[in-house]
Image (cartoon, coloured by chain):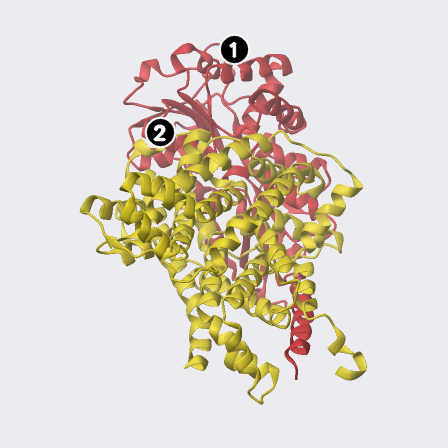
Chain colours: A red, B yellow
Amino acid sequence: VPFRYVSVAASSIAILLGAVSCGRDDSASPSSGSGAASATVVVYCSADKEFAEPIFRAYEARSGVKVLPLYDTEETKTAGLTARLAAEKDQPRADVFWSSDTSRAVALVDQGLTAPYVPKTSESIPDQYKSRDGAWTGFGARIRVLLYNTEHVKADEAPRSVLDLTQPRWKGRVAIANPHFGTTSFHLAALFVKWGDEKAVDFMRQLKNNGVVIAAGNADVRDRVADGRVYVGIMDEDDAVVALRDKKPVAIAILDQEGSNGLGTPLMPNVALLVRGAPHVDQAQRFIDFLVSADAEKMLAESDAAQYPLHPGVPGPTLLPPLPQIRAMEVDYREVARRLPSMDAAVRNVFGL
Amino acid sequence: VIDRLRLSRLPPALPLAMLLAATAAPHTFLAVRFATAPAIDVMSIAPALLFALTGGVVSAVAGGLLGAVAGTLETRGRRWAIGMSAVLVAAPPAFWWIGLTRLTPAFGSLSGAGSGSGVAGLAFASVTFLLVLAGAREIPSSAYEAARLSLGPVRRIAFVLFPLLRPPLLAGFLLTVVLLLGESEIPFLFGFRTSMTDIVTTFSQTFDAGRVVPVIVPLLATVVVLGLLLVEPLFTVILPAPTGGRGVVRKPANVVVAASLFVLPAMMTLSLSGYAWAAMSGPFAWRARSVDAVGVSVAEPVLCALVSVGLAVAAAYPGRRSASVRALAVAGLLLFCVPTAVVGIGWITIGHSVGGFHVTPAVAYVSRMIGLSSLAFLVAYSRVPQSLDDAARLVPVSSFRRAWTFSIPLLAPSLAAAAALTAALIFADRDVASLLLAPGASRLMLNLYLMSANAPSAVIGAAALVTFVASAVAIALAAAVPSVLLWRRRG
């Protein structure tokens, strides 16, 4: 047979194989068997892989259900997965969305991409951290903290408020993560809600003029502070705790705690969402029951994730002050979600990102 | 059936043209999106070009100097230095950079486009280095020997050696620029904006190709222009020279010059030392967690590389002597120049357009790499003496058997090199993996980035070392399979 014919056949087969290999993967098809051993649950997870995996393993050991997680990268935290969920809304692939960013999770609810579900284990979670109709349920909260390098900054010199970061003392020595993504976007959008657009944009301009370093993610901010490349940085408490664990020359300060009108620091519960049209609804509901349970919160508090349990009576992280001693920023998560687009536009305008 | 379908009248280059057209499907879809809503965003192409051009200059200078030394002088350990320098392509620039920052925080204090260009340019200096080395082997020995007799070292290098090496230097510079235009990790790490950071962030925020097409179009236009500029110098290096008596006669070098050859291997060793240092900082239980996904991370690039090379050979072989070979080789080169993330976005767009189908990463990898494999085959074949191919035609066997037994084994080294390079590039990818991997799937290189957020240093260091070793294994396997298959036949 002349090679030319083989070649035409091979090329045609290659093109066909290419097309055939593009298809709905097994994880998206409803589980056929009723036995838990063959069951799976697809979880889109914007929490750090490092912290989420022990939870998944614990659930697998407890239920026999295989968890198929999909994470997003540090640079596109949470925004990447919410966009993916929106793009897949007609043919959802995910069953559950574990969002580490409260506002973007609530935005998904507003877009109608989720289905209501009241977890059996959520009764004792305070009302402000969940919606009454089960549209979303918070668990394992984090706060925003300031990490400073103790070789360059004494405890009494550390900034007390986010507004202090615009002072000349900190010129070129402050780092924040890319404000388009993750909890930094939540933090800035929350400031838009509390201060109004004008003051918030002015604050961003002052930060820019003060040479704020925009890092790839919160972990990058932490590393820059720990290495002394910058002196202070804002991040989530779990990122800061990792630096303490690694015995870096750093200390944690919680911003905006002083004064009768103190702003407070943003408190951001993780959010468990049932995806509308989830391929494995039963498994998704059982997984959410576990995720928001006191057991899972205890694991998250005891691990390096150092997250604050929302169930009363569950011990909190040991390296941080107890939650009742922290002045949390009073903010409507839904309103923060609504401010995300205008905050994004302002970030693009001010920082050129 | 064959006669009835009149397949014998098909143009011999048709299979390769069909295959390349199929691999261009993502680009075609993005072009259609652009045609339906034409808009261009050129805000980020200028900083992207500045970053890539500066990195290209660094690569050309560093790689050029080292290549000239390795190509004209004989030193102890020269082969080792060349081999280790080539290993730099086994991982992306960000991998090497992060390893260095683990060694000392002083490295980590660098930021901005200038520093990023320097680091990325040095990491890609091995590309220019290898091209210059190949170019030095094509220099007429008589011409360079005459220059050695009549000119001092400085004048000889400035007025004879570097002009003779202009094609590989230019090819190394342009290839580095093309590769850096597709780079997003270094800009993220050094905190500046390029077209790729815009594409990655905007697409992640929207998952809508329509939003990134305005940024992709100027980037692709730039890449195509650079790819076309690359054709002449690259083909000059990789196609056989018409002159006889090739290659500079290498003369012994002094110790200092010999030591300079180890600059790139030293960088690589320092970076790996940084990871090793980090890996030793924690208990074994932590380090042991880093071996997840080794098997699939090795198997995928090897299989994709073999499929790419196999398909390219099958499709290109019939048209190896046709008049359109050069055009097809250029098309293959241009397809390879398109950044991986853009190919991935194109495939996602296709998936959405045809009813929410999910494209596997392997499809995106193979579709991008077939162009490179086709180029490798066509170039390698052009280096085979015509008489050998003619002699093979005298043997009374089928054309398939003739190709498998006589012709293709002659190309074994080039096909093995193409498979190795393909496997290296696929292993190093993070963009397609993060866009197209199915839930529950994982890859070592992506895991490394995911765990770099908050994993203990010991885990990250161990994971990086495991990743590097797995990359080396994947590259070796990809190169070994065609070598063994074809070498046995040649024997």
Q: Amino acid at mark 1?
A: Asn
Q: Tell me, yes or no, if residue B1 can be seen here.
A: no
Q: Quadrant of the N terminus of chain A?
A: bottom right
Pinpoint residue B9: horizontal percent, then vertical percent: 76, 75
Rendering coords of residue B106 (x, y %): 30, 31
Q: Which residue is mark 1?
A: A261
Q: Residue, x 81% and y 83% (percent of image)?
A: B4
Position of A293 compared to A344: left or right?
left
For disc 2, the marked residue is B109
B377 or B371, which lies in front? B377
Above or below, comparing residue A197 to residue B435 in the picture = above
Q: Which chain is disc 1 placed on? A: A
Choose between B257 and B186: the one closer to the eye: B257
Q: Identify which residue, B130 or A26, lies in the foreground.
A: B130
Q: Identify the residue shown where x is 68% and y is 68%.
A: B15
Q: Is residue A318 left or right of residue B193?
A: left
